[in-house]
Image (tube, rainbow, N blue to C red):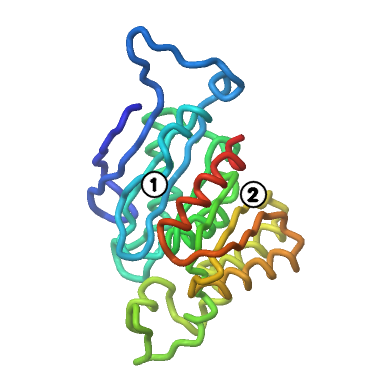
Amino acid sequence: MSNLTIRFYSNSLQRYTTFQMIIPNDIRDGASREENDYSRRKMKTLFLLHGFTGDAGNWVPEFYCEKYNFAIVIPSGENSFWLDGISTGHRFCSFLGEDLLGYVRNTFGLAKSREDTYIMGLSMGGFGALHTALFFPEDFGKAAGLSSALIVHKVAEMTDGCGDPIANYEYYRECFGEPSKVLESTNNPETLIMKIKSEGKPVPEIYMCCGTEDFLLENNRQMHRFLEKENVDHVYEETTGGHDMEFWSKYTEKFIPMMFG
């Protein structure tokens, strides 16, 4: 299992940045890798997104990489919600879907098609995974959001001077743009779904889950209801659990075989 840390220049962020990468392409002398349908197919790639206050880190059991033959790309997105912010150097959606994806394609020859390119995230990263796949539907074939922070409707109700215990108004405006316009903007996954459908493009396969004790439960249910109303095929599951790694680990180990199997 190759573990890499790579530094490269991002035009969207206007600075150097680093990302981690895991590639299951090394085999010890005397060892052998079992030939199966997964090892015989072209290697797939999973982009893995962290949550609010997090940074690049792998929470996918590495034996899955070998079993299903996929690489993992793990960037750092600060507290950006993985969106193109309004200030210079904060275009994190473009960083993901243009700079980083392009670098991985050109340097490693991976993630060349949507059929081979997936994305997964937790909390803020769950929002980012769903949003990125919907923003670039011709590049990402599958997206999984674990306890996704689908808070665009909450942001839309914010006014100058108000925030919440997590962040102030200025933070949400930086990430999402003018709150009064966010629901109609491309920062809203629902808007992107409608755009994809109107353009006749394929909607990425969507996997979602949320714990019944999670403070984001209703936000995820709202997205689930929207997808049902728009007849968008997707997987949505709820079970006992909170907003924590115990729940996310459980569904990582459930969704990975569903996505890659």
Pick whichever, 121 or 85, lies toward us: 121
In the orientation shown, which residue stands out farthest toward the front?
240
Residue at x-position 40% and y-position 22%: 25
Indicate the amino acid at tag 1.
Trp
Residue at x-position 44% and y-position 32%: 63
Q: Residue 221's spot in the image, x, y percent? A: 62, 70
> Which disc number belongs to residue 59?
1
N-terminal-most mark, 2 or 1: 1
Q: Residues within 10 Å of mark 2 (few under 14, many from 20)?
A: many
In this picture, is 43 found above or below 52?
A: above
Residue 191 figure quarter: bottom right
Distance between the Cα atoms at labels 2 and 1? Answer: 21 Å
Dot 1: element = loop
In this picture, is 3 found above or below 173?
A: above
Residue 240 figure quarter: bottom right
Q: Is residue 192 visible?
A: yes
